[in-house]
């Protein structure tokens, strides 16, 4: 070897030694912050409409990491609605039907059904008392799974499913349409007297039945039938898993009861502490009461701020961002908000709008959410047909300019952008041919 070659080799060895010493001096954090050159973010599986897979992968590549566990990293947040977004059909419905079939709803205190919801109308309370009152004493489970209790099951199912009695009289009144839905809230309120652990047991039994039932199956509830099956969307399971592998902090926000969603969320790897559902207040013994936890400026027991439209924003700000008091009801600075959100309904619109990078909408032909998604004024919305039994193309444009939005008192109006300009009517363009 020549003198020049020997010199170059010594210089290279000296440079390598210096680099190693630098890493050792900087400590393990500096080493962890330098992922291997071949590292790449995880990839989504196929099965998406149009260029949605590419858009989602772009989100993962930009905000995710091939080294998600490196110390000190602030994880990007992703939030999913649950019913008809991650699964086909509604796990709240599945649980309600199981409760009725198995006689797990209790006669309310003093037989007074108005105690189950502050929004229940006197007419609905009377109809429920007439159908259910003679069956058992207050506090005891009603025999709604027997022929003797079939009329009671029918009345409860009607009020829950149609917000009206079997006679067609309005069952609820006086609620804020942007922060709660009394029929959704009524399910956890009817779970009064049970513990969260017992409700998780009920939900697990309903889950097993609904996953085992064939697609399209119906079940007998009272004297009628109801949907009897649920399926996870494989594409959403894969998306959630991929986001988590890329280091995203993935949450579920649902208007179904907290213990119920906890059970179902395990099927996509989401732990209970990353689930935000409708939450009851509890007794000292841990039994659920007919009252609900509040958020923002709404106190516990007021029953007026569930995970629904603006209520979802409040609960996400509270549970994920740690914001307390009235400030949780407000839109937070962009740097603090979720980068990704997914939903299927107008009930999801506020937390979808809060997402800063990308918003996925599963098309169920709902007015406000589709108006905003198709308008796509900031280029951050993507639309996908339902993955199982997709809705057909809507025959007429969405009424964005006239009645696509619902005010707090139920008054319809035009859907407006952030600058208050009106969104024009939108044709339905993303569907399964």
Image: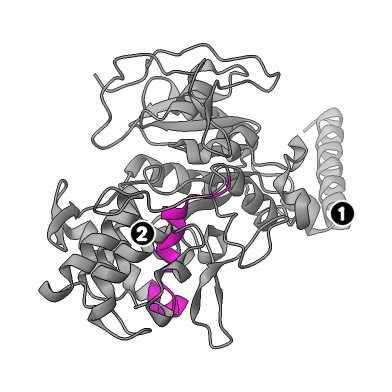
Where in the figure is residue 282, as x and y percent of width and height?
A: 55, 78
| Residue 379 quadrant | top right
Mark 2 against mark 1, which lies toward the viewer?
2
Query: Residue at 16% of width from left, 63% of height from top?
Result: 222
Q: How many labels were placed on the picture?
A: 2
Q: Is residue 19 magenta?
A: no
Q: Is residue 180 magenta?
A: yes
Where in the figure is residue 197, as x and y percent of width and height?
A: 43, 78
| Residue 356 quadrant | top right
In the rendered image, is residue 114 in sight? yes
Left or right of 66? Residue 200 is: left
Q: Which residues are magenta?
A: 179-199
**Crowd band around label 2 with a 10 angstrom C-alpha radius: few (<14), some (14–19), many (20+):** many
Query: Residue at 43% of width from left, 20% of height from top?
Result: 51
Where the N terminus falls, by quadrant?
A: top right
Query: Residue at 45% of width from left, 64% of height from top?
Result: 262
- Disc 2 to disc 1, how far (Cα)? 69 Å
* Residue 124 disc label: 2
Disc 2 and disc 1 in contact, CB within 8 angstroms: no
Q: Is residue 260 above or below residue 48?
A: below
Where the C terminus falls, by quadrant?
A: top left
**Crowd band around label 1 with a 10 angstrom C-alpha radius: few (<14), some (14–19), many (20+):** few
Left or right of 147? Residue 308 is: right
The front one of 392 and 430 is 392
Where in the figure is residue 407, as x and y percent of width and height?
A: 57, 34
Residue bearing the label numbered 1: 26
């Amino acid at each position: 070897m020549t003198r020049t070659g020997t010199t170059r080799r010594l210089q290279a060895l000296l440079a390598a030694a210096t680099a190693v010493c630098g890493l050792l001096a900087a400590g393990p954090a500096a080493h962890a912050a330098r992922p291997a050159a071949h590292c790449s973010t995880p990839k989504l599986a196929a099965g998406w409409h149009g260029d949605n897979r590419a858009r989602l992968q772009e989100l993962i590549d930009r905000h995710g990491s091939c080294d998600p566990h490196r110390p000190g990293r602030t994880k990007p947040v992703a939030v999913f609605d649950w019913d008809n977004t991650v699964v086909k059909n509604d796990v709240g419905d599945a649980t309600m039907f199981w409760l009725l079939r198995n006689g797990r709803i209790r006669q309310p205190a003093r037989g007074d059904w108005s105690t189950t919801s502050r929004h229940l109308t006197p007419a609905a309370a009377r109809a429920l008392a007439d159908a259910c009152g003679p069956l058992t004493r207050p506090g005891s489970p009603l025999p709604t799974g027997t022929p003797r209790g079939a009329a009671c099951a029918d009345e409860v199912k009607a009020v829950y499913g149609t917000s009206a009695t079997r006679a067609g009289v309005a069952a609820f009144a006086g609620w804020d349409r942007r922060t709660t839905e009394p029929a959704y809230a009524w399910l956890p309120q009817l779970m009064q007297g049970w513990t969260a652990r017992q409700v998780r047991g009920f939900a697990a039994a309903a889950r097993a039945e609904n996953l085992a039932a064939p697609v399209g199956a119906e079940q007998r509830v009272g004297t009628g039938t109801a949907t009897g099956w649920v399926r996870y969307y494989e594409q959403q399971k894969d998306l959630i898993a991929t986001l988590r592998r890329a280091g995203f902090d993935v949450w579920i926000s649902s208007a179904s009861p907290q213990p119920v969603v906890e059970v179902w969320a395990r099927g996509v790897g989401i732990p209970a502490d990353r689930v935000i559902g409708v939450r009851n207040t509890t007794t000292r013994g841990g039994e659920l009461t007919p009252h609900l936890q509040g958020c923002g400026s709404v106190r516990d027991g007021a029953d007026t701020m569930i995970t629904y439209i603006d209520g979802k924003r409040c609960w996400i700000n509270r549970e994920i961002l740690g914001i307390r008091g009235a400030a949780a009801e407000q839109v937070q600075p962009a740097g603090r908000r979720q980068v990704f959100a997914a939903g299927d309904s107008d009930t999801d619109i506020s937390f979808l709008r809060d997402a800063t990078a990308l918003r996925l909408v599963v098309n169920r032909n709902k007015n406000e959410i589709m108006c905003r998604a198709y308008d796509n004024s900031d280029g951050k919305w993507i639309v996908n047909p339902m993955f199982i039994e997709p809705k057909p193309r809507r025959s007429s444009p969405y009424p964005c300019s006239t009645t696509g939005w619902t005010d707090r008192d139920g008054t319809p109006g035009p859907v407006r952008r952030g600058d208050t300009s009106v969104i024009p009517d939108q044709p339905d363009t993303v569907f399964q041919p």
